Amino acid sequence: MIRTALATSVAVVMLAAAAAAPAFAYDPKEYAYAAGHMITPKEIAKPLTVKSKGYFSAGPDGGSFLCRKNDKDVNYPGGSDRYSINYNAENGTRPSISVNVQQYSSSVKAIKAFDTLKKAAKTCAGPANGSDNWTGENGAPVVQQWSQLTTTGSVPLVTVVGVPSIFINVNYENVVSNEESRYSSDNYTVYTLVNDVIISTSFFSGSQLNITAPQKKAVNQTAFNAVGTWVG
């Protein structure tokens, strides 16, 4: 079932990654399957225009971070292995899209992890803010004030065996006292349960505070495509 119709530039990167021999114990067949079943640029919906070269990686999967709320990390159980591919924007700017596949030892464990993820996502929802302090190069105190708003919900478009995906959207903004500019970003991620894996499809805006409705729709469609590529 290994996919062979890969874009040439992507295939080169994947083969190079395979030749690098990851330093963790892995099943060669699963590694080859994952490398051949990641999305290509043709499967990334517009307006998420990306470069033709994707960067594939593989490694062990531990506990998975969702958000930080009330000074505590919110996580869900990780699997055994994680396979990822990342694409940067075609125009060289910071926006990027990535697909991560968390492999679990069984579908039962994947289901339990996804159930935990859904409950944890609700914990992440809502506003949060804080400040950090440090000493600048000239010895003067520096204060960074930040705020974020996290929303979550279901994605009916990406439903597998009756289980809809969920999304987590994080709008982040900070200002540093010794800098004139304000930093903003928006991260929109769709999580999908597929047999014994959890696939997360994520779009990072770079410096845009609010990604547009067409961009969110495109991420949802890309998540749908990622599922089809994985099981195809």
Image (spheres, rainbow, N blue to C red):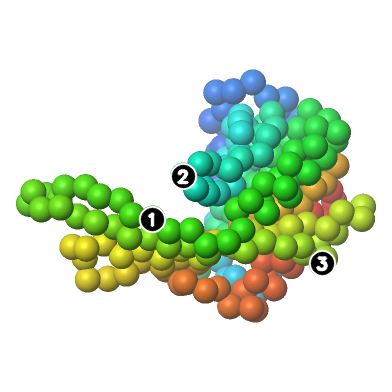
Residue at disc 2, secondary structure: loop
Q: Which residue is mark 3?
A: 157
User: For this rendering, which residue is in front, 39 or 220?
Assistant: 220
Q: Amino acid at mark 1?
A: Gly
Q: Residue furthest left?
A: 138
Q: Amino acid at mark 2?
A: Asp
Residue at disc 3, secondary structure: strand
Residue at disc 1, secondary structure: strand
Q: CA distance from mark 3 to mark 1?
A: 35 Å
Q: Position of residue 99 (x, y in %)?
A: 64, 52
Q: Which residue is mark 2?
A: 71
Q: Amino acid at mark 3?
A: Leu
User: For this rendering, which residue is in front, 164 or 232?
Assistant: 164
Q: Circles 2 and 1: CB distance less than 8 Å?
A: yes
Q: CA distance from mark 2 to mark 1?
A: 9 Å
Q: Which residue is mark 1?
A: 130
Residue 212 makes an appearance in the image: yes
